[in-house]
Image (spheres, rainbow, N blue to C red):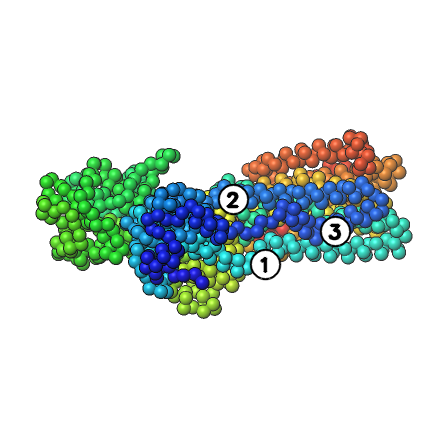
């Protein structure tokens, strides 16, 4: 059982771990412990062997039928047919395998969680070691910017603050101290511990390693993730059901046709079996699995170009069905760049323009820039907040302004720079560092020969130190800023005697001159506000789930358009609700504040109970269970932990809410294009199946061979079917609510359209075949060739119908928008010319060259199909618009 190291004195911890604080572990002892306990790494899930992944590509009922067809044709001695069928099956498997591997590799470049190196004490010397080689008992040194490499018990802390949002969800840094805590102290309050995966924001410290790898707090949560049940995506459910239905129908139809042909048309048993195999091959959309994979892979690539890395292909389509997006606030809806927006002194109120840490903006009064040296109290306030400050403002290698230290202090430096005059940062002679227990920071400085104490901190704390005459005035100002979702920092000063050398809390207990306050906000992303508006137009709900305080969360939520309600639900209230009450509450509230990891998981489950397709964002290890439970878990790429990324279906490279919305748009486009592709490709199979069924019913010679049918299916699949994947998102798509995930893949209209076009193309092709066969002037190979080209060219013309589901196909502004359509059409024509005129293709596929004037038959049928379908679409459009 793991020890509660936080409840032990540090001497007891060191004794328990058998390590000397001045020497650390010896190299030999460290090596021995590494051998015994293993490397300091989170265990990776078992990786599926590539061979197994490849075999899984064959796990499709439609593929099973093809494999059976290949076996039967082989037993009947039709080896060319067998080889072609096997090649088709292999191509489908290879395409699926390649695309899935590409999607997995896209994520590898952004994995970055545990520290790569750690500075430790070994044999009395400081050395840098690979963090994976850290062992229990190692003494670790901590400096600003370091990632904590393992779970540590703090030995020494000097103004040490650690950002633990990855583990606890709290956005503010935690000040660490070396003091014994009570048994049962919760994780977020264990101030004498530092946890793996968190980061040092300021100060320095020393800690002793008490847990590594899977024994760390991160490791424990990593284990619990496996308990969350994997959800099946809507597309997987629909295609699986569709495949089974098609297979059953095909097999029943094949048996019935064999019985009919054998007993009523007296076909030879062997020839009839080949014809029935031809019927099965004709009816099976064997290219469909490959096409689905390719369309989804195109979606993956398009999303990656927009900073969204999708970890598995079906999730692309699931994004299109998302009906509610649950988002964190900091860094996703907001910029995660604290910005000073208001300066209030006794004689005036000022606005501050500009956003982020870049010192670009002005201090304004009535929308006009002011000279702060002429505004009573403003320059003094800026001097205090710039001097009483441990942060640094600088540019990175890319020229972006960044801060080193606390974000709140960083934005105060930016504020001082916006004054457009030189605000001096005084030399600090003595300092009282900020501490959450007393909520202020103080510095001793010398100004014009006088000693002064500058103070910065919580307004209520500074007001209690001052002898101000108008406390109600300031309390009202502070409350007003807080109601706008802003953090408020107060500033003041106190004169002291010239011989003062150091300061302590007694020196600032009273007589502080209160200068004023600064309002600070983490500004919303402008693009996120637009995206939220677009989400609502598309019928997608947005929920803010944050660890921030209720008032702040509600103010931001209103400002961004997430809610127009005056109420929010807090985590402690969620804990008191039953599952049924929470399922009701989750529809009533849009803002959830002060939430715990358990709250997030319960909220996702409550939304799913109401049949929402839920997207949940998160970055910390504590978010992992909720991310995995969600239909689409979205991890942050910049500040997200590896565990969060591994538990999600999508990773945002830029941590931006707008990227989620763009991904949802892409998901809808993918699904629409997928449906259009099905609407296009299934009539090919239907037309071929009709030709075979009609021929058996009428006692005619088979118009095509099984291998020719496979040619038609695959040549259309690898050319024309791919073109629709590149169609743009239709304008009206984002004006519609999310689709019902339980809706059938094929609507009643789709079934009608598939049957209608199958009869149109199949009937037309059969009439061409019968007409030419009736003349008695053409041999079998010539008839095969004219029939083959007729059915393919008819599909080519039908492709242009399918670019719009029911809209007019020849719209001037969109007809040339998809260049892929024209490219694949050219490739298809070249392939058809090859199978018609190249001798070796003639030998393999039993075809022969056509006379030029005989191409008129396929072209005329194609034009007829296009016109008739456009008429049908116009009628359908008018009916649905009524």
SS for dot 2: helix
Identify the residue at image location x=60%, y=57%.
Answer: 743
User: For the residues marked 2 and 3, what is the alpha-carbon distance in whole angstroms?
Assistant: 35 Å
User: Do the numbered discs 2 and 3 sit on residues whose CB atoms are within 8 Å?
Assistant: no
Quadrant of the drawing holding the N terminus: bottom left
Comparing 741 with 310, the one in front is 310
Q: Which residue is mark 1?
A: 742
Comparing 674 with 422, the one in front is 422
SS for dot 3: helix
Q: Which mark is residue 362?
A: none
User: Residue 88: horizontal and vertical position, in percent?
Assistant: 72, 43
Comparing 844 with 779, the one in front is 844
Q: Nearer the viewer, mark 1 or mark 2?
A: 2
User: Residue 357: horizontal and vertical position, in percent?
Assistant: 32, 41
Identify the residue at image location x=38%, y=58%.
Answer: 16
User: Residue 775: horizontal and vertical position, in percent?
Assistant: 87, 38
Q: Is residue 523 visible?
A: no
Quadrant of the drawing holding the C terminus: bottom right
Identify the residue at image location x=33%, y=38%.
Answer: 401
Q: Which residue is mark 2?
A: 107
Q: Is residue 506 above or below residue 817?
A: below
Comparing 854 with 582, the one in front is 582
Q: Earlier in the sequence, mark 1 or mark 3?
A: 3
């Amino acid at each position: 059982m793991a020890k509660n190291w936080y409840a032990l004195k540090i001497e007891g911890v060191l004794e328990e771990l058998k390590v000397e604080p001045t020497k650390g572990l010896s190299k030999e002892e460290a090596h021995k412990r590494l051998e015994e306990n293993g490397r300091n790494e989170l265990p990776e899930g078992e990786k599926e062997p590539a061979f197994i992944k490849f075999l899984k590509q064959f796990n499709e009922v439609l593929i099973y039928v093809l494999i059976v067809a290949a076996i039967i044709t082989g037993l009947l001695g039709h080896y060319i047919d067998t080889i072609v069928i096997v090649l088709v099956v292999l191509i489908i498997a290879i395409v699926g395998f390649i695309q899935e591997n590409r999607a997995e590799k896209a994520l590898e470049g952004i994995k970055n969680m545990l520290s790569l190196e750690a500075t430790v004490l070994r044999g009395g010397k400081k050395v840098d070691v690979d963090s994976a080689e850290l062992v229990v008992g190692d003494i670790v040194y901590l400096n600003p910017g370091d990632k904590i490499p393992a779970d540590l018990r703090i030995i020494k802390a000097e103004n040490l603050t650690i950002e633990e949002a990855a583990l606890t969800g709290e956005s503010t840094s935690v000040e660490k101290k070396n003091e014994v805590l009570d048994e049962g102290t919760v994780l977020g309050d264990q101030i004498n511990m530092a946890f793996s995966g968190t980061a040092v924001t300021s100060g320095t410290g020393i800690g002793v390693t008490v847990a590594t790898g899977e024994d760390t707090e991160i490791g424990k949560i990593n284990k619990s993730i496996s308990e969350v049940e994997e959800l099946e995506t809507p597309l997987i459910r629909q295609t699986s059901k569709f495949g089974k239905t098609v297979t059953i129908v095909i097999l029943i139809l094949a048996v019935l046709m064999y019985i009919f042909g054998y007993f009523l048309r007296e076909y030879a048993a062997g020839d009839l079996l080949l014809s029935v195999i031809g019927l099965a091959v004709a009816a099976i959309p064997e290219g469909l699995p490959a096409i689905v994979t390719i369309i989804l892979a195109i979606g993956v690539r398009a999303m990656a170009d927009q900073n969204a890395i999708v970890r598995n292909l079906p999730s692309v389509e699931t994004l299109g069905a998302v009906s509610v997006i649950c988002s964190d606030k900091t860094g996703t809806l907001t910029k995660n760049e604290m910005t000073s927006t208001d300066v209030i002194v006794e004689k005036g109120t000022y606005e501050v323009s500009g956003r982020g840490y870049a010192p670009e903006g002005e201090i304004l009064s009535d929308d006009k820039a002011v000279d702060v040296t002429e505004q009573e109290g403003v320059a003094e306030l800026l001097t205090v907040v710039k001097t009483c400050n441990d942060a640094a403002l600088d540019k990175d290698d890319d020229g972006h302004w960044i801060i080193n230290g606390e974000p709140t202090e960083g934005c105060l430096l930016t504020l001082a720079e916006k004054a457009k005059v030189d605000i001096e940062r005084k030399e600090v002679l003595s300092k009282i560092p900020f501490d959450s227990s007393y909520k202020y920071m103080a510095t001793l400085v010398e100004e014009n020969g006088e000693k002064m104490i500058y103070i910065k901190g919580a307004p209520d704390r500074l007001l209690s130190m001052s002898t101000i005459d108008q406390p109600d005035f300031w309390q009202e100002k502070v409350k007003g800023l807080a109601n706008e979702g802003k953090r408020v920092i107060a500033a003041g000063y106190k004169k002291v005697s010239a011989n003062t050398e150091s300061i302590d809390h007694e020196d600032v207990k009273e007589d502080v001159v209160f200068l004023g306050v600064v309002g600070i906000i983490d500004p919303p992303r402008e693009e996120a506000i637009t995206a939220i508006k677009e989400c609502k137009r598309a019928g997608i709900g947005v929920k803010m789930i944050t660890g921030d305080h209720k008032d702040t969360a509600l103010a931001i939520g209103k400002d961004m358009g997430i809610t127009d309600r005056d109420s929010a639900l807090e985590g402690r209230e969620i804990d008191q609700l039953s599952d049924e009450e929470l399922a009701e509450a989750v529809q009533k509230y849009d803002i959830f504040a002060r939430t715990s990891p358990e709250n997030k998981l319960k909220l996702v489950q409550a939304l799913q109970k109401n049949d929402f397709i839920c997207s949940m964002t998160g970055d910390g290890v504590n978010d992992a269970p909720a991310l995995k439970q969600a239909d689409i878990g979205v991890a942050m790429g910049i500040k997200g932990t590896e565990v969060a990324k591994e538990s999600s279906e999508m990773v945002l490279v830029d941590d931006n809410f707008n990227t989620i919305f763009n991904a949802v748009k892409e998901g809808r486009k993918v699904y629409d294009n997928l449906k259009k592709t099905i609407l296009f490709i299934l009539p090919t199979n239907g037309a071929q199946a009709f030709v075979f069924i009609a021929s058996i019913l009428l006692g005619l010679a088979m118009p095509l061979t099984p291998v020719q049918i496979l040619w038609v299916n695959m040549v259309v699949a690898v050319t024309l079917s791919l073109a629709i994947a590149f169609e743009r998102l239709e304008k009206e798509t984002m004006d519609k609510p999310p689709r019902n995930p339980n809706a059938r893949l094929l609507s009643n209209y789709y079934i009608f359209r598939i049957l209608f076009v199958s009869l149109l193309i199949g009937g037309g092709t059969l009439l061409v075949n019968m007409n030419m066969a009736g003349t008695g002037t053409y041999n079998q190979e010539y008839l095969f060739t004219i029939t083959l080209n007729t059915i393919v060219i008819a599909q080519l013309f039908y492709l242009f119908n399918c670019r719009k589901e029911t809209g007019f196909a020849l719209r001037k502004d969109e007809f040339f928008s998809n260049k892929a359509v024209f490219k694949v059409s050219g490739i298809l024509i070249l392939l058809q010319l090859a199978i018609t005129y190249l001798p070796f293709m003639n030998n393999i596929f039993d075809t022969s060259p056509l006379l030029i004037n005989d191409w008129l038959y396929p072209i005329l049928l194609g034009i007829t199909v296009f016109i008739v379908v456009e008429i049908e679409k116009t009628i359908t459009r008018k009916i649905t618009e009524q």
